[in-house]
Image (cartoon, rainbow, N blue to C red):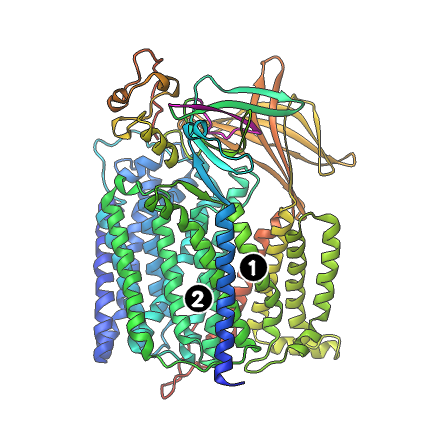
């Protein structure tokens, strides 16, 4: 029943519904015709149902090994485990576009469902913008990347999936990352709707912020998951390559972070309005260009166009319409928005502006570093690459002031503040940071890692102090403090936790710069010494797997004679793809990772030697743990009462509320 | 504080941050950019020993030698673009996809006795060729991608431009099977 043809039909239907969703509510809102406006939620839900049907058809085809579908034949195989048959659906270009459209459909339906209390014209316009964007991508999917195309004659077995991608971490990385990318379509739609209406006020800031925070949480988790995957699957011992694909996710994360901060100023002070609208447009534009330009390989190589000109031109056209159109609308309408007041440099809003300036400078640096090589090769025919040395030299000096001011920002009162009282409250954090600096000087090398560890401690301590100061911990009876803590808005805790998460991540990054590694070629029975541990290669065996054969090493790791762990790094050879993968073995105690990689076998069969790479990665798990803490902070701030009720009223309109997703 | 001074503060902050960003980038562009070089470029004029470059080409078939210094594994191999070859010395584990006769990018510095790589990249799958390597091969007239997969590296020094167009290795070269696509 769930045939590929049904899927194809459902996709076409979704495209038509999306087009209707993109046009009718806009007309309704313009004519103030309630009945036409009320079509928007129904169309959004209908589009979602059609997309869901299409997606399920593709999953069904993948699970039932329908190799007459070209996409399945090219990316799946009978022998592939069920989990990867399902997740393999979005592991290729066509399927990932369909997933992207599905998530966009979910966003539209979510606005329809949770935005019931938005003014009807605003809601209709937001849903319409989402529908118009969705229609473009569904048309792209239908015309140039049809996931349901049949192939004849149908092969007996598929070509299989790259073994590197057969990993649970990567299976769930794309949906989470895409939800982050696509989630920023909602603030984008709010921005476009506000530009059409010509009106941005505090209530708008309050409505847009939960969507931005939700998308930001997913993007944070998605980036962390991707980095973790490259750490434990690729086996090179690093966690971030400054690859265009990675940068493409970091750029919208930076502007998105700026957006969730500047929206606070819109909400509280009715200021920075035009800037916030621009940030919302920029964040989604970067998300779009990131996924489509980078993932389609156009950024890496201009020749990707030659492979499939229709696809490349369609993508560029679509991006030009979405990004160019929204920027043109911005240029045309922004002057009509009333500008907010200026404010004192030393104040909460001043600190938030500084946060925005620094984050945008960082974004500019990453963007330039990513775009420079393709431009150089296009314009001057020079092949260059920009890597870690460039990004280290440019991003760290800009990030340092950001970390310093992160400690002050949340403590500054609105409107007018004085630095001295805040400094007085932060003296404990300053002392802790100084202690951390002193400790780090003994244990670490390099001024930047030492400075960053001290700043990480500063950020974490300042976040904790922010809460303890607010509840007057130890200044009043504990019950009183608890009472105060209960009364504090959850967004205060959210801020503190998210900031502390940043501190945890910085600490992890700083410590990882001190990682040690060793590469040796040894026979079985040799003991190596690294970072105070004794690593003994006790055995190497050949073991068969379901669709590969593996060479598995046994590594006993001892510390002061006591056995810490027995690791089994291995090397798999996949018969079907003539490919080998390295299976890293990692032992963590949360303070450090012991990381073992098995390389090639050399020597004669009588006296074989094995190449081993051993890493000692201090505080490695903290990098991703910090990202998780940031996301938890975001979720906590989403659950704030103010985001759900608290009546974000517009002047002379009925009490409107918005529910956070 | 007047409106004017407040605006001034804002402008100062913006200019300072973006100025710092621009200055940092300009400095990094002059010292931290890594250029791509081909073996023939290295043969013509070797880059200074303190400058990191990416050397790309094909691994000459039969040139890979592995040895040990103490317990440290060392690999030596020749990288060619069909016109010149450079010997690369690498300490460590060669990537899973490293093969003789296939494309490779070595990141490192050029010394008197050869190229010392700190990193060797052989990416994705066996049919993949880094863009730079493909460009270099096309420039040297050794391969035209329109006429099939790249020929075996061992055959290049005796190959002519016409051979490349036909997609055939030179008659005297040992024919190697084209890698199976996936």
Query: Dot 2 falls on which chain?
Result: A
Query: What is the residue that sits farthest to the bottom in this orientation?
Result: A652
Q: Main secondary structure of the magenta part?
A: loop
Q: Magenta includes B91? A: yes
Residue A661 visible in the snapshot? no
* Magenta part of the chain: B83-100
Q: Position of residue A274 (x, y in %)?
A: 39, 74
**Rendered residue at 57%/68% (across/down):** A495
Q: Are marks 2 and 1 on the same chain?
A: yes
**Rendered residue at 73%/48% (across/down):** A443
Residue A329 visible in the snapshot? yes
Q: Identify residue for label 2.
A: A212
Which image quadrant is residue A93 in?
top left
Badge 1 element:
helix
Query: What is the residue that sits farthest to the front in this orientation?
Result: B45
Query: Dot 1 falls on which chain?
Result: A
Which image quadrant is residue A155 in?
top left
Quote the CA–CA distance across marks 2 and 1: 22 Å
Q: Magenta includes A491? A: no
What quarter of the picture does the C terminus of chain A occupy? Answer: bottom left
Say which of A2 and A54 sits in front.
A54
Q: Position of residue A17 (x, y in %)?
A: 23, 61
**Rendered residue at 59%/79% (across/down):** A413
């Amino acid at each position: 029943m769930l045939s590929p043809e049904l899927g194809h039909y459902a996709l076409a239907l979704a495209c038509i519904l999306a087009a209707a969703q993109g046009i009718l509510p806009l007309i309704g809102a313009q004519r103030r015709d309630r009945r036409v406006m009320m079509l928007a939620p129904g169309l959004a839900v209908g589009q979602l149902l059609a997309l869901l049907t299409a997606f399920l058809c593709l999953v069904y085809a993948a699970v039932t090994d329908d190799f007459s579908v070209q996409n399945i034949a090219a990316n799946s195989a009978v022998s592939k485990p069920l989990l990867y048959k399902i997740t393999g659906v979005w592991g290729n270009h066509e399927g990932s576009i369909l997933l992207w459209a599905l998530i966009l459909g979910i966003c539209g339906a979510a606005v329809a469902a949770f935005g019931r209390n938005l003014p009807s014209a605003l809601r209709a316009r937001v849903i319409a913008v989402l529908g118009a964007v969705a229609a473009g991508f569904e048309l792209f999917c239908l015309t140039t990347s049809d996931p349901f195309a049949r192939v004849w004659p149908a092969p007996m077995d598929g070509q299989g999936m790259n073994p590197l991608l057969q990993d649970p971490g990567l299976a769930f990385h794309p949906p989470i990352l895409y939800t982050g990318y696509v989630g920023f379509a909602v603030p984008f739609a709010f921005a476009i709707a506000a530009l059409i209406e010509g009106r941005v006020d505090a209530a708008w800031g309050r409505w847009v912020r939960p969507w931005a925070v939700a998308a930001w949480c997913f993007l944070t988790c998605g980036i962390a998951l991707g980095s973790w995957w490259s750490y434990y699957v690729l086996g090179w011992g690093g966690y971030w390559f400054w690859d265009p694909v990675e940068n493409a996710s970091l750029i919208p994360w930076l502007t998105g972070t700026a957006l969730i901060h500047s929206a606070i100023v819109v909400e509280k002070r009715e200021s920075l309005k035009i800037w916030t609208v621009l940030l919302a447009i920029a964040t989604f534009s970067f998300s779009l260009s990131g996924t489509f330009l980078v993932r389609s390989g156009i950024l890496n190589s201009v020749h990707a166009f030659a492979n499939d000109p229709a696809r490349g031109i369609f993508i560029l056209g679509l991006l030009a319409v979405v990004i160019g159109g929204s920027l043109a609308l911005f240029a045309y309408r922004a002057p009509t928005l009333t500008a907010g007041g200026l404010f004192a440099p030393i104040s909460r809003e001043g600190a938030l502006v500084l946060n925005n300036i620094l984050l945008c400078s960082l974004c500019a640096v990453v963007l330039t570093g990513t775009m420079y090589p393709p431009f150089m090769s296009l314009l001057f025919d020079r092949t260059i690459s920009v890597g870690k040395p460039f990004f280290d030299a440019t991003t760290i000096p800009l990030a340092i002031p950001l970390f310093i001011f992160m400690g002050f920002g949340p403590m500054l009162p609105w409107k007018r503040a004085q630095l001295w009282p805040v400094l007085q409250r932060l003296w404990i954090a300053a002392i802790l940071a100084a202690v951390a600096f002193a400790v780090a000087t003994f244990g670490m090398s390099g001024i930047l890692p030492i400075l960053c560890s001290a700043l990480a401690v500063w950020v974490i301590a300042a976040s904790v102090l922010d809460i303890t100061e607010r509840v007057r911990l130890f200044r009043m009876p504990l019950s009183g403090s608890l009472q105060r803590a209960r009364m504090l808005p959850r967004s205060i805790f959210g801020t503190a936790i998210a900031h502390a998460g940043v501190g945890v991540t910085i600490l992890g990054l700083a410590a990882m710069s001190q990682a040690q590694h060793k590469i040796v070629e040894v026979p079985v029975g040799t003991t190596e010494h690294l970072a105070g541990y004794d690593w003994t290669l006790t055995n190497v065996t050949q073991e068969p797997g379901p669709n590969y054969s593996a060479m598995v090493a046994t590594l006993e790791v001892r510390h002061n004679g006591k056995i810490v762990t027995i690791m089994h790094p291995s090397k798999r050879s996949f018969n079907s793809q003539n490919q080998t993968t390295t299976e890293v073995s990692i032992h963590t105690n949360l303070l450090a990772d012991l990381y073992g990689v098995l390389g090639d076998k050399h020597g004669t069969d009588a006296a074989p030697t094995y190449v081993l790479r051993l890493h000692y990665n201090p505080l490695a798990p903290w990098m991703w743990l910090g990202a998780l803490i940031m996301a938890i902070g975001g979720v906590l701030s989403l659950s704030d009462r103010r985001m759900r009720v608290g009546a974000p009223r517009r002047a002379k309109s009925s009490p409107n509320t918005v529910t956070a997703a | 504080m007047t409106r004017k001074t407040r605006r001034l503060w804002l402008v100062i902050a913006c200019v300072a941050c973006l100025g710092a960003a621009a200055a940092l980038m300009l400095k990094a562009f002059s010292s931290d950019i890594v250029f791509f070089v081909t073996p023939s470029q290295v043969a013509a004029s070797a880059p200074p020993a303190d400058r990191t470059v990416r050397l790309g080409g094909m691994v000459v078939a039969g040139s890979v030698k592995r040895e040990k210094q103490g317990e440290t594994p060392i690999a030596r191999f020749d990288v060619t673009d069909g016109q010149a070859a450079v010997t690369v010395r690498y300490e460590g584990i060669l990537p899973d996809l490293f093969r003789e006769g296939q494309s490779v990018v070595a990141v490192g510095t050029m010394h008197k006795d050869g190229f010392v790589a700190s990193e060797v990249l052989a990416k994705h799958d066996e049919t993949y060729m880094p863009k730079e390597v493909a460009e270099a091969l096309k420039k040297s007239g050794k391969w035209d991608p329109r006429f099939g997969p790249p020929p075996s590296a061992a055959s290049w020094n005796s190959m002519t431009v016409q051979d490349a167009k036909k997609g055939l290795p030179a008659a005297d070269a040992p024919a190697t099977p084209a890698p199976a696509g996936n």
